[in-house]
């Protein structure tokens, strides 16, 4: 951790980490685990599969997971508008998929 965050930047890093986590809990309540689950599985995929192949596995996982979330949301609240975790995970899918392509291109 010291190689990424200097001693001088540590208070700002901890503040952002705590406030960001609390905001996620406030907005999405018990479904916040989806964010960390998606990021964790994406990290595992990038480490397990070959650099030239992991972006394809990542696409299948991310779009499958997001589709599952949308179907679940549609079955439980069709036509309604609730601020649920899919609003954030759609952005997260784009970020993680771009990360996997950047990792592939970096090879």
Image (cartoon, rainbow, N blue to C red):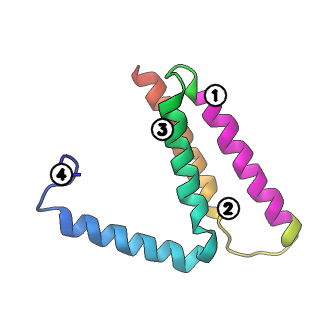
Using a 10 Å C-alpha cutoff, classify the residue at mark 4 as few (fewer than 14 neighbours), some (14 to 19) or many (20 or more).
few
Q: What segment carries the magenta color?
A: 55-74
**C-alpha gap between disc 1 and disc 2:** 22 Å
Say whether residue 18 is left or right of residue 7. right
How busy is the neighbourhood of tag 2: few (under 14 within 10 Å), some, or many (20 plus)?
some
Quote the CA–CA distance across marks 4 and 3: 23 Å
Q: Kindly check if marks 1 and 3 are in contact, taking CB atoms under 8 A apart as contact.
A: no
Mark 3 or mark 2, which is nearer the start of the sequence? 2
> Which of pointers 4 and 3 indicates the residue nearer the eye?
4
Rendered residue at 88%/65% (across/down): 75
Asked which quadrant contains residue 17, the reply is bottom left
Identify which residue, 74 or 31, lies in the foreground.
Answer: 31
Q: Alpha-carbon neighbours of circle 1 within 10 Å: few (<14), some, or many (≥20)?
A: few
Query: Which element is circle 3 on?
Result: helix
Residue 72 on image: x %, y %: 81, 62
- The label nearer to you, 2 versus 4, is 4
Q: Which residue is mark 4?
A: 2
Judging by the rendered image, the residue that carries numbered circle 3 is 99
Q: Give how far across and how far down residue 86 sits, in percent.
A: 67, 61
Sequence-wise, the earlier of marks 4 and 3 is 4
Does residue 98 sit above or below 91 in this rendering? above
Quarter the C terminus occupies:
top left
Residue situated in front as seen by the camera: 30 or 9: 30
Instruction: Assign a secondary structure to mark 4.
Output: loop
How far apart are the alpha carbons under marks 1 and 3?
12 Å
Mark closer to the chain start, 1 or 4: 4
Do tag 2 and tag 3 residues touch (Cβ < 8 Å)? no
- Pointer 1 residue: 56
Residue bearing the label numbered 2: 86
The residues tagged by marks 1 and 4 sit, at their Cα atoms, a distance apart of: 33 Å
């Amino acid at each position: 951790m010291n190689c990424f965050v200097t001693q001088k930047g540590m208070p700002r890093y901890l503040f952002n980490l705590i406030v960001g986590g609390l905001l996620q809990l406030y907005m999405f309540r018990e479904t916040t685990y989806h964010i960390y689950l998606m990021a964790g599985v994406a990290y595992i995929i990038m480490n397990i599969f070959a650099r030239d192949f992991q972006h394809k596995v990542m696409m299948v996982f991310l779009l499958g997971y997001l589709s599952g979330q949308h179907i679940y949301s549609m079955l439980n609240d069709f036509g309604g508008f609730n601020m649920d975790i899919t609003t954030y995970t759609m952005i997260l899918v784009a970020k993680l998929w771009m990360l996997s392509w950047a990792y592939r291109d970096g090879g």
